[in-house]
Image (spheres, rainbow, N blue to C red):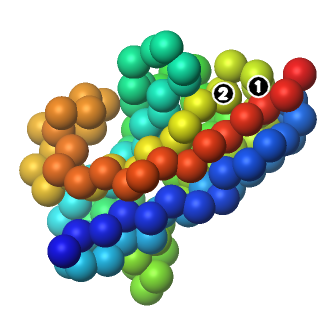
Amino acid sequence: QVQLVESGGGLVQAGGSLRLSCRGSGRTFSRYAMGWFRQAPGKEREFVSAINWIDGMTWYADSVKGRFTISRDNAKNTVYLQMNSLKPEDTAVYYCAAAARPLNVRVKNAYDYWGQGTQVTVSS
């Protein structure tokens, strides 16, 4: 059974940093793409960032480019999202997801597995 477990969310002031973690279990993710999405109240779930596990290629939404960094640790089966210079508009529940055959990593329907989410709140 595949499980994705996020951690690292919390409350931070604007300009601060947080690092989210997503630990996968239940299979080898070496040929998967791993993505981070977020959903603010009353809004659609939106793409934040993604990484190809096998070659480390990365993608970012324009709204987070230059502030967020996605990375992976093969030994720990874990993907990270380092979030710097946080803004109040980054407030959302952040979800980790895994896609076995990612045709478009920016589209949520490309993903097969999802975590439960972790809340990130940025105060002004």
Q: Residue 90, labelled with which disc?
A: 2
Above or below, comparing residue 84 to residue 66 in the picture: below
Please say whether residue 116 is visible from this viewpoint: yes
Q: Which label is found at residue 87?
A: 1
Q: Quadrant of residue 56?
A: bottom left
- 84 to 30, vertically: above or below: above
In the rendered structure, are the residues bearing label 1 and label 2 in contact, judged by CB atoms less than 8 Å apart? yes
| Residue 57 appears in the figure | no
**Kind of residue sitting beneath label 1:** Lys
Q: Residue at x 54, y 20 (%)?
A: 41
Q: CA distance from mark 1 to mark 2?
A: 5 Å
Q: Is residue 18 left or right of residue 80?
A: right
Mark 2 element type:
helix
Sort mark 2 into few (<14), some (14-19) or many (20+) by Cα contacts within 10 Å.
Answer: many
Q: Which mark is residue 50?
A: none
Residue 23: % across, % down: 44, 70
Residue at the location (51% across, 60% down)? 6
Question: Residue drawn at (17%, 38%), measured in percent from left and top?
Answer: 110
Quadrant assignment for the N terminus = bottom left
Residue at 40%, 76% (x, y): give it: 77
Q: Amino acid at mark 2?
A: Asp
Determine whether, in the image, residue 60 is placed left or right of residue 12. Answer: left
Give the x, y percent position of residue 37.
43, 37
